[in-house]
Image (cartoon, rainbow, N blue to C red):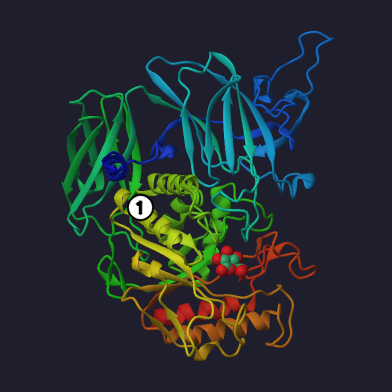
Amino acid sequence: NLNNIAIVFFIFFSISITAQKTEYANLLQNIDARQKTSLNGKWDIIVDPLENGFYNHRLQEYDKGYFKNAKMQSPSDLIEYNFDTSLQLNVPGDWNTQMDKLYYYEGTLWYKKDFNYTPTSNQESFLYFEAVNYEAIVYLNGEKIGKHIGGYTPFQFNVTDKLVEGNNFVVVKVDNKRKKENVPTVNQDWWNYGGITRSVHLISVPKKHISDYSIKFEKGKYNTIKGWVAVANSADGETVNIQIPELKESAKATVTEGKASFSIKAKPKLWSPELPKLYEVIIETSTDKVVDQIGFRTITTDGSKILINGEETFLKGISIHEEAAFKTGRIVSAEECKVLLNWAKELGCNFLRLAHYPHSEAMVKEAEKMGFLIWSEIPVYWTIQFENEDTYANAENQLTEMISRDKNRASVVLWSMANETPESKPRLSFIGSLAKKARQLDDTRLITAALDTQGKGDDGNLIEDPLGEVVDVIGINNYCGWYYGDVNSCSSIKWASAYNKPMIMSEIGGGALYGLHGDKNERWTEEYQDELFKSNIEMMKNIDFMVGLSPWILMDFRSSRRPLRRIQDDFNRKGLISEQGMKKKAFFTLQEYYHDMDEK
Ligand code: GCB
């Protein structure tokens, strides 16, 4: 019937129209350069497994929740919670490693913080959370201001009209219950650290402010820097100045509909792993100024090669989780990032796979200064609900926030859509749509995904996953000697690919307990892990379309899938370094492999 056809057409067109828009997440770019008040430090907390502070006894959301931060007014009052006398936790930080009884906790926990505010005229204020795992409902002075889903990306709320002079309080309901429809889903091989895991800021900007910008080489060019600056609350005609003092270059651009586009003829020194050159870039309007450090480089492919600045480059990498050395738990400072990054340098790496979720902005910026190329990933991990529209919207939102935050980082070269997802049509269209979205937001970086290839092919491992069609670079996770195959036999495995595209061996590896020694056929010994690396390295030397690798993994990390007592004790032991910073034998084997490559 014609009506139905018309409706179908209408739906189809509205979907394709919305899909055309290039919309970044609503995030202030480069918060390091803004005037801000830190809300880090001790926060009062209430552990609330039954969500008693959110629902009444009929399980209806109610208005007398803990977010009211109510106080007794008279001795006869009944209020069954009190933030002022409650326990406290550090922000940033996961709750699991701060309090013994929260080690396995997954559920709701309330955080409260008091802070002072002095209004200034013509200013706007934003509450900015660098990350909260997993769901955050935020209240200011007893009123709900918004909700965010996804544990590893930043979000902000404009609170200009909600702040009062003097004392204010912010309450956050944080819930890290795992759910099938979530991204990641219920099953993950890393610890589900809950809490306000990254920093919180109150950021003040002029009412008319630079909200966002993108500055990079025009695609395919080394002599043109192209970009745009978004100016909030600005009328058309406002001028934006962009300066790169060291290059003695600048441009003026004019705002129309909130955005000013510009292009600068310039030949900057290129950012590369050998010389991670960053230029100071100053962006200025009549009311606002933001300074950033930006590097310029290109990343392209040519058949099965990866080219950085036009030069064929092998990505000598390592995978890392964002977990702190020595103390374990989530990383909370740039210093803790640097511990891992220095180890990666020592290993001889020029490449990092930041698994399996966007790491902190500090990690990306520190890595950029040290010259690491970065693979950045969203937690579309294993068997998420590929047919669920809400799950898709959630994944796309996390992708958008990741790209929005890091689009000016020269270090980031690969956006990864997924890790080890099972082949199916819905999965192909889900990840295909994510890739399309990523390319709309950023057409200058490469798209990848880590594929699960276990035991494919008879006399070799054939890469023919249909997702190979979607990505620019194929990631392969392969555990010869650990999940399949004999540890000594990996060297003879032959690989083939149905795609003429670069391949990165995004994971290989096996577990070893630091200090446990024995025969090379004895699992969990350093010798076994070392043999596995040697045998896999021989295998990889024969793959001519392999252009990089990021073995699993730099350091042992916590995972609730790893209970084996006296060996794992809740740690995935595939690290080349123990969580206490001790290097295992395989560290030196990989180091030698990377070193030998440099010699050639
Ligand atoms: C994988 C996953 C990674 C796991 C690893 C393992 O393939 O991508 O998240 O931690 O294997 O140790 O099993």
Q: If the image is split into quadrants, where does the C terminus sit? A: bottom left
Please provide percent x and percent y for residue 68. Answer: 66, 20
Q: Is residue 207 above or below residue 129?
A: above
Residue lying farthest to the left in this orientation: 265
Residue lying farthest to the top in this orientation: 74
Please provide percent x and percent y for residue 510. Answer: 62, 75
Give left or right: position of 14 versus 64: left
Q: Is residue 167 above or below residue 475?
A: above
Question: For ligand 1, which image quadrant applies?
Answer: bottom right
Which residue is disc 1 drawn over?
438
Of residue 36 and residue 553, the one placed in the foreground of this image is 553
Please provide percent x and percent y for residue 325. Answer: 64, 58
Asked which secondary structure carries label 1, the reply is helix
Quadrant in the picture for residue 417: bottom left
Kind of residue at badge 1: Ala
Give left or right: position of 179 versus 154: right
Q: Residue at x 17, y 45 (%)?
A: 263
Q: Residues within 10 Å of mark 1 (few under 14, many from 20)?
A: many
Q: Is residue 237 above or below residue 129?
A: above
Of residue 478 and residue 351, the one placed in the foreground of this image is 478
Q: Residue at x 73, y 15 (%)?
A: 71
Residue 372 in sight? no
